[in-house]
Image (cartoon, rainbow, N blue to C red):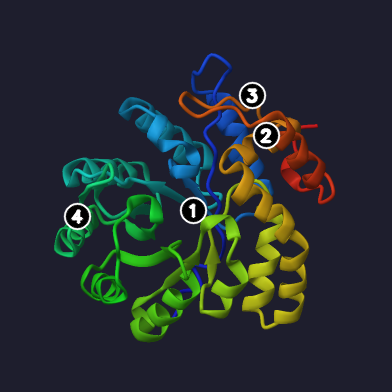
Amino acid sequence: MANNDFKGCWPVAPTPFKPNGEIDKEGMKRVLDCMVDQQVDGICILANYSEQFLLSDDEREILTRLCIEHVAGRVPVITTVSHFSTDIALSRAKLVKQLGGEMLMMMAPYHGALMKGTPQQTFEQFAKVGEAGVTIMVQDAPLSGVDLPVPLLIKMAKEIEMVKCFKIECAQAAAKLRVLVNEGGDFIEGPFDGEEGITLFADLEAGATGNMSSAMIPDLIRPVVLDFLGGNTQKSEEQYNQILPLINYENRQCGFRATKVVMKEGGVINSDFCRHPIPALEENTKKGLLNLVKRYDPIALQWGK
C-alpha cells in the first residue's frame, strides 16, 4: 500500500547555465523557488532532465549542497546518485545524508551500451547505497538499458530497508506498475509515473500515487494526480486530456530543453543554454512550444515577469 508521504508531483529541476556554459547558481536558486511556488510535493535534482551527464563530479557536489540548503526543508529534495561504481554512488548518498537530504534516486548500474549490472549486482548496489540511511527511489528508466523485472523490484523492496519508491518509465509502464503494486503490497510505498507524464493517467489507473515530470507544468499536472487519488477520476481525466497536447509536445519534440525555454520566457532563468553536444532547440520547434504553452499560462511562464 502506498505511503501518503510519497504522492503528488515531484518534478525534476533543470540545471541552468550561463551562455558561456558555467552553472548559473543564482538561476538555480530561482528555479527552486519557482518550483516551490508551483506547489510541488518534492523536487528531484541531478536527474537526466537536469543534464546530469554534462556535469563534473565537483559540479554535482556544488549543486547538491546548493539545492538542499536553498530549499531548506520547504519540500523534500530527491538527489540522483546513479553511477556504475557502487563506491561512487555510496559516496554521493553519504553527502546527501550529511546535508539532510530526504531521498535518493538511482538507476541500475550501467556504463555505455554494453556494461550492465546483473540482477544480483543491481541488488547488491542498492543494498550498499542503502547503508547511507536515506530513502531510495528506484528509477526503472529505458536509458540504462537494464531490465528490472518485477520479482527483482519486489525483492529489493522487501529486503533493502531504504528502498521504498519506484519510478517506472519503461515501455508498457502501466502493466508493470499494476503487477508491482498488486504483488508487492505494503512494501511498495511510492509507485511513481515518469516520462514527463506521457502515460500518467494509465499509470494512475494502475496504482501510481505520484508523478515525476519536468518542471515545466507541474502546477497543471499535480491536480490530475490529486483529483485521481481523491476519487474524482472524471475530473482528473478531463484535466489530463486538456494538458496532454503540451505534455506530448514536450516529450516527443523537445525533451529537457522545453523547461529551460519556458522558464527563460517566464523570467525564471536568463538563458536556455545547453552544454555541448546537446544542440539548442530548433527555432521553429521552440516557437511551436511557446505558442502552445501560452494557451495554458503555467506558473513557469509568468513567475519572473
- Tell me, yes or no, whether the two marked residues, 4 and 3, touch with CB atoms within 8 Å: no
Residue under numbered circle 4: 117
Q: Quadrant of the N terminus?
A: bottom left
Secondary structure, mark 4, is loop
Q: Amino acid at mark 1?
A: Pro
Residue visible at 67% across and 55% down?
Answer: 247
Which sits earlier in the primary sequence, circle 2 or circle 1? Answer: 1
Residue under numbered circle 1: 76
Q: Residues within 10 Å of mark 3 (few under 14, many from 20)?
A: many
- Report, in whole angstroms, how far the alpha carbon at label 4 lies from the one at label 3: 37 Å
Q: Amino acid at mark 2?
A: Val
Residue under numbered circle 3: 271
- Tell me, yes or no, whether the two marked residues, 4 and 1, touch with CB atoms within 8 Å: no
- Tell me, yes or no, whether the two marked residues, 3 and 2, touch with CB atoms within 8 Å: no
Query: In the rendered picture of this protein, how many numbered marks are placed on residues?
Result: 4
Q: Is residue 203 left or right of residue 120?
A: right
Query: In the rendering, which numbered label is found on residue 28?
Result: none
| Mark in the foreground, 3 or 1 | 3
Which sits earlier in the primary sequence, circle 4 or circle 1? Answer: 1
- Above/below status of 22 relative to 169: above
Residue under numbered circle 2: 261
Q: In the image shown, does 209 or 279 lie closer to the viewer? A: 279
Which sits earlier in the primary sequence, circle 2 or circle 4? Answer: 4
Which sits earlier in the primary sequence, circle 4 or circle 3? Answer: 4
- Report, in whole angstroms, how far the alpha carbon at label 3 lies from the one at label 1: 26 Å
